Image (cartoon, rainbow, N blue to C red):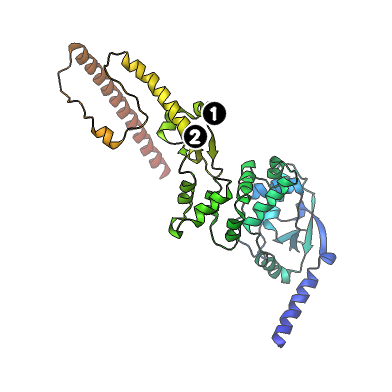
Amino acid sequence: MNAVTQAEDRAITTLEVADPTKNLMLVALSQLLARRSKRNARTTARMSIPELAASIARVGLLQNLVVILAADGKHYEVVAGDRRLTALKLLVKRKHFAADHEVPCLLVPDASARTVSLAENLLREQMHPADQFEAFAALVKEGRPIEDIAADFGVAPLVVQRRLKLANVSPRLMADYRTGGLTLEQLMALTITDDHAAQEAAFYGAPEWQRGASALRERLTEREIDATHPLVQFVGLDAYTAAGGGIRCDLFADDDSGKYLTDAALLETLARGMLDMLAEGVRAEGWAWIEAVPHLSYAERQAFQNAPRQRREPTRREARRVTSLQSRLDKIDAELEEAYGWMRERSRRWNSDAGR
């Protein structure tokens, strides 16, 4: 019982020492040492500094730094808030703040510095990603433009759009995500549609071993055509959309693999029209029978065989052309070999000079 009492006494003493009403002060950035303090409990690399700097520039520094007096008695070491300090120094470098710009700092005794630093990092509870998604959606609902929200947090508008997409997932799925019932990757895959019933059917209607992100995405787009499909490449997305075709986009994809054409019938109609035009040109060559189809099954392919090939000697004109091309190839090979030899000699000399 005495041990508990002593621990509580030490905790109370620490709180009194770090009391913001007594030791909170404004310190010029020029007085804050840029090097990481040895008392700082966090030693991992600083992350997302540009984004944090952009946020501070927009909305200000929302949390004070914790400092101790440096050995010279004129400067301060930051024992908690090193990432914030790095972002502030970046803003000074970018001329957003002057070097003497003052920021709120909580001064603590050197003896308590490491404990305070550890407490700030260890006892801080991270916001659940679901809370972030819903907070972004609430900002938009309040009338904030997506571009403004992105600027406030130092991120691209696409990041905000992705958060909004995640916030729009079925409440049932979101509740299970909060409790670990599904992963962020699965949640991202389900955003391919805004239909909550379809989302739930795709996830809960499949056995657990078929609930991977790729399987969920395929299940929700099984009646649509991936933009990387050869038929889409043949027709072209511009022609398809100009004809009124719809496209569903996966905000979490980085290329055309995240685009899905929702009107397969229109795509095939456009493809047949283009094939018919090409067939007319072939028909003009004098062929007796021509049929253009967008798909050819294995069985249909087996109904046709390759025409037998016969080898013949080239004509005089063809022989001269072959000889001319071979001469060009021999000349190019010689030039390449000469260039490779020059590069090898230069590399040998460089290595020889470097070893001296």
Residue 255 in view here: no
Q: In the image, is residue 176 above or below residue 353?
A: below
> Quadrant of residue 192 in the image?
top right
Label of residue 220 in the image: none
Few, some or many C-alpha atoms within 10 Å of disc 1 (few <14, some 14-19, many ≥20)? few
**Along the line of sight, the residue nearer the viewer: 72 or 233:** 233
Q: Residue furthest top?
A: 317
Q: Are the two marked residues, 1 and 2, in contact with CB atoms closer than 8 angstroms?
A: yes
Give percent across and percent down for residue 26.
82, 56
The residue that mark 2 highlights is: 263
CA–CA distance in space, label 1 to label 2: 9 Å
Give percent across and percent down for residue 48.
63, 50
Which residue type carries mark 1?
A: Gly
Which residue type carries mark 2?
A: Asp
Q: Is residue 317 left or right of residue 137?
A: left
* Residue drawn where x is 28% and y is 26% of the image: 333
Image quadrant in which the N terminus is located: bottom right
* Residue drawn where x is 18% and y is 12% of the image: 316
Image quadrant in which the C terminus is located: top left
Q: In the image, is residue 149 above or below residue 120?
A: above
Label 2: element kind:
loop
Give percent across and percent down for residue 274.
42, 23
Q: Residue furthest right?
A: 22
Q: Is residue 97 left or right of residue 213?
A: right
The residue that mark 1 highlights is: 244
In primary-sequence order, the first of circles 1 and 2 is 1
Residue 123 in view here: yes
